[in-house]
Structures are given as structure tokens and as C-alpha cells.
Amino acid sequence: MSVNSTPAMQHSWTMRIANLTWPILIGQLATITNGVIDTIMTARYSAMDLAALGLGSSVYISIFVGLSGVLQALSPAIGQLFGARKFTEIGFEVRQGAWLAIFLSLLGAILLCIPGPLLAIAQPTAALNDKVVEYLQILALALPATLGFRVFTSLNTATSRPRMVMTIQVCALLLKIPLNYLFIFGGLGLPAFGTPGCAIATAVTAWATLITGWFIIRRGSHYQAFEIFGKGWGKPVWQAQAALLKLGVPMGLSYLIEVTAFTFMALFISRMGSDTLAGHQVTGNLGTVLYMLPLSIAHATGTLVAQEIGAGRLVQARHTGNAGIRLGVMLSVATGIIVWVLREEIIALYTPDAIVAAAAMPLFFFISFYQIFDAIQVGAAFVLRAYKVALIPTIMYAFAMWGVGLFGGYLLGFNIFGFTPTYLQGAAGFWMGNSFSLALVGMALLWYLKHIQHLLEKEAHLID
């Protein structure tokens, strides 16, 4: 037996996704605006510090996203429990997620404090290297707080309460702005730190955010049904840790693969000079901001799909997933067109440096073009995670993002075979390879999602 959707049903699914998306989007934009502010303020401090930020943030984001991606296993687990109305089991998952965040923080702090092997790939100057190392070592102090807050975020998003997270993230942004100005440019008796000042502001804001979030969980009436603190905190349960890692490690690897594709782009592009790297940083930063829209829609879609699966409604889960991917694609296409039309004005907001602006201009074609594929791949990936399917998608990411995107971009960007067109040499070659890889993985994930949905519904005797 199969169930066909009507236009009214499709509208209902889309509206549910939209209602959950907008607070996630605002919260994500508030978070990512921290990076935009870092870029804008540092660009006005010095070109050297902007290059250090581009290199340092690429390394940090790779580590943070990989580790926080492991914690994303909490979202489908809590979402399915919430859909099945197994509320007390949610508290257990949250406690185990907090323990996992602590373990991951220790690992990440070690990597941030000893970044030499990664920085060696970029071959930075001594002055640039010193700034980046100081920046990363300060961020090691922020990592436990940012990962701890990820547990809070997963709980609220999976139980359809993203507005609480949004409020905290917006307040954190309002705190970060004056702290950034103080620590980057100096004041109140403090020296000007430049790029490391961004890290100091981030650390202060991260800990304030974590303390606020956990205070709300402790005192909020909504969370009492989950019994997060009611039975004591308890010790790590290694079976539960293993279950989270079984799903979380492939998820974290898929995040890591996607982000390190950009990280190694920055490391290789840095060999082309500080101005080229700064232009790449401007373009990459805007691309990250634009990615928040399909990412937020994917978050909302994955949450609702997980809840439907937990409630045993597989057909509704499929239609909800399809509606979310469709919505993400339509909005991302519109965004790409707007960015292309306004590209000169957008670059001018980032930097007053004409050389950096000229380096960024040709790269804006790529972030305008690949929006549709970015929406498809992130939407399909989050829906698959709602089904607790992550291993095969991770393999697809590795082949496409590393094998096709990064390696292909390297061949084009450095003109290894001698026949790369002039307009694709340099940073543009890396962006071309990345765009093609997103198209490839998007189509592969979409096919695999349809395959998984068909198998599960057939097993449940919902289709012939």
C-alpha cells in the first residue's frame, strides 16, 4: 500500500518545516555572524591578520566541525525518542551526550595546541605562523564550552524548541561585538591583539553561552519531563557511548570531509600569496553564511523526519523529507541569483582593499552557481541521518569532496598538466573542483535516500 500526497498535505509539511526553520536560521546566522565580524574587523586591522584569520579559522573549523558532528548523533536519537514519547530516555541520552562532549573536548584541545603538522602544509611565514598558533591555542580554551552547548542545541532542536537556542545565540552575538573590538584593537588598558583578540572574545562568549544554556535546562519546567538531573548525573555508560559513536563517528567524518575540503583549499591557496588567500577568505566566509539557509532547513527537516520515524509514520517521514529538500532547493536558487547580481556591493562590505576585492570577484561565480547542489546534498544528508543512516553517505562524501573536489581542484589550480584555462588557474580552479564535487555528492545522496526510504517502507508493508 502507498499513500500519495495532495497539494494541501504538501503545503502542511512545508509550513511545519518553515516554522521550525526560521528560529534555527536566525540562531545559525547569529553564530556565523561571529565569523563575519571577525573577518570585517580583522580586515581593518591589517592584511596580515586577515590572512592569519583565514588560515587559523580553517584549521579550527575543521577540528570543531568534525567533533561537533559526532555529537550530532544526539539529534536523531532524541528526535525519535520524542516522537515515540519516551521522555525519560531523553534525559539519559543528554547525560551521555555531555560525557561524550567532555571526551571530545580533550581530543580537540590537544590538536589545537599542537597545530604544527597542519600549518606545515600551508608553509606560512614565521610572522603569520606565530599569529595562527596563538589564535588556535586560545580557541582550545573555548572548545569545551562550544561542544557542551552543542548538546543543549541538539536537545532543544530535536524536541522542536529551537527558539530557546536562537535567543541565546543572538545574545551571544551582541556580547561578542564589543568584546571583539576591545581585544582586536585594544582599549581599557588592554593592548591590541589583532587576530588572537578574536579568539579571546570567542572564548569569553562561549563560556557565557554554555553557562546560560545549562542553567535554563536546570530550571526550565519544559525539561522536567526528561529527568535530565532528576536521577543524578551518573557515570558514562560505555554501551551508550558506543551507540552514539557508531552513528556519530560517520556523521562527524562526513562533516570533517566537507569542511577539510575547504580547509585544504585555504592551505594550498595560501601558497599563492596573502592577497589571494584574503580574497578566498572573503568568498568562503560569504559562502558559509549562505550555507546557513539550506543547513537550517535541513536541520528542521531532519528533526521532523526523526519524530515521524519515532512515531512509526514512515510515509509521512518520506513526504516531510521530500518537502524539506524541495524547499531548500527553491530558496537556494533564489539566493544564488541575488548574490550574483549584488556581488560588487557585497565584496565592498567585506574589504576596502582593491587587490583583495579583485581576487574575490571571480570566485563569486562559484558560490552563486553551486547553491542548488549544496541544498540537495545537505538536505538529503540530514534526512538520511534522521533514519540513522550515516556510513554510506560518509563514503560518498570522501570520494566526492576529497577525491574529486580537492584533488581535482589541485590539478586545476596549480595547472599540473599544463592545459588548465587561465581563468581556472589559481583559487578559481579549487572552487571549480569543489563545485563539481557538491553536484556529484548531492545527486548520489538523493538517490541513496530514495533507496533507503523504499526499503524501509517495503519492510513495513507500506508499499508493494
Image (tube, rainbow, N blue to C red):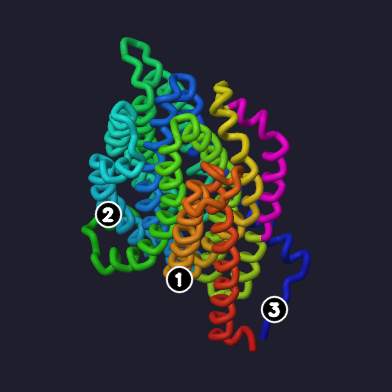
Q: How far, Cα to Cα, is label 3 from label 1?
A: 28 Å
Residue 460's tag is: none
Q: Is residue 156 visible?
A: no
Give the residue drawn at x 44%, y 65%.
394
Q: Quadrant of residue 354?
A: top right
Q: Secondary structure at mark 3?
A: loop
How far apart are the alpha carbons under marks 3 and 2?
Answer: 42 Å
Q: Label 2 sits on what residue type?
A: Trp
The span picked out in magenta is 326-349
- Quadrant for the N terminus in the image: bottom right
For image coordinates 31% across by 41% down, the residue present is: 119
Q: Position of residue 165 (x, y in %)?
A: 48, 43
Of the residues under marks 2 and 1, which one precedes in the sequence? Answer: 2
Q: Residue furthest bottom?
A: 464
| Nearest to the observer: residue 48 or residue 74 | 48
Residue behind mark 1: 392
Residue 89 magenta-highlighted: no
What secondary structure is marked by label 1? helix
Question: Is the residue marked by circle 2 packed among few (<14), some (14-19), or many (20+) residues within 10 Å?
Answer: many
**Label 2, on which residue?**
99
